[in-house]
Structures are given as structure tokens and as C-alpha cells.
Amino acid sequence: MDYTRTQREGTLEIIAARWMNLNPSQAAKAYESVKDTFSNYTVPTDEQAKAYIATLTATAGLKGDVSAASIFDFSLATEASKEMGLKR
């Protein structure tokens, strides 16, 4: 998460080329729409997950009413964050 917050250009490359297969403009739009939601806890809140889904809908053609649970599984990250004593 620290990389994502501090390395914008590298993160855009990952979003565009490796993660969501977006063009650079779409990747920048996706990044800008969620950058303020990045947390040290590494697990998004429900509100943050909804923002990610909205971004996918706007930039990657996600269709229909999609629940966060159908896309994300943060169970391991949640457990690790708790063990590390990280706070939301």
C-alpha cells in the first residue's frame, strides 16, 4: 500500500498493463478516483470497496450490481493486519 500511495507512475503502469488492462488515461482516472482511500491497514472499508467497484464500472466495463464480496477476498490481509497490530 505504501508503494501505491507514493509511486504514482509505477502504480499507473501496474493498473494499466498488469491488473485491469486499461489504457494510460483510464488507469490515471482509476488511480485518481481512489488514491485518497488507500490505508495503512491494507484492507478497504466497505465504502472504499464500493468506490473501487464504481471505478471498475466507469473504466473497465463492469456490468450489473456487483457486491464487494464477489470480487474481493481480503481475509488473509485482514488477518495479517490484525496480527501486525495495524489500525484502520
Image: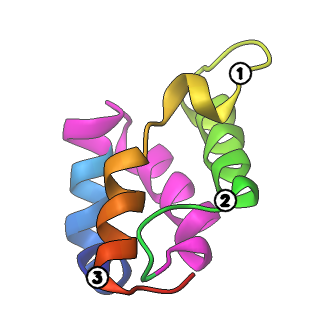
Q: Determine whether 45 is above or below 76 in the image.
A: below
Q: How many marks?
A: 3
Name the one closer to the observer, 50 or 27: 50
Residue identified by numbered label 1: 66
* Callout 1 crowding tier (Cα within 10 Å): few <14, some 14–19, many ≥20: few
Question: Which of the two discs, 1 and 3, sits closer to the camera?
Answer: 3
Counting other residues with Cα less than 10 Å from the Cα at mark 2, is it few (<14), some (14-19), or many (20 or more)? some
Q: What residue do we see at 80% from left, 18% from top?
A: 65
The residue indicated by pointer 2 is 48
Q: Nearer the viewer, mark 2 or mark 3?
A: 3
> Which residue is labeled 3 in the image?
84
Q: Is residue 54 above or below residue 14?
A: above
Residue range (magenta) = 16-39
Circle 3 crowding by C-alpha within 10 Å: few under 14, some 14–19, many from 20 = few
**Residue type (three-letter) at the residue carrying disc 1:** Val
Q: Secondary structure at mark 2?
A: helix
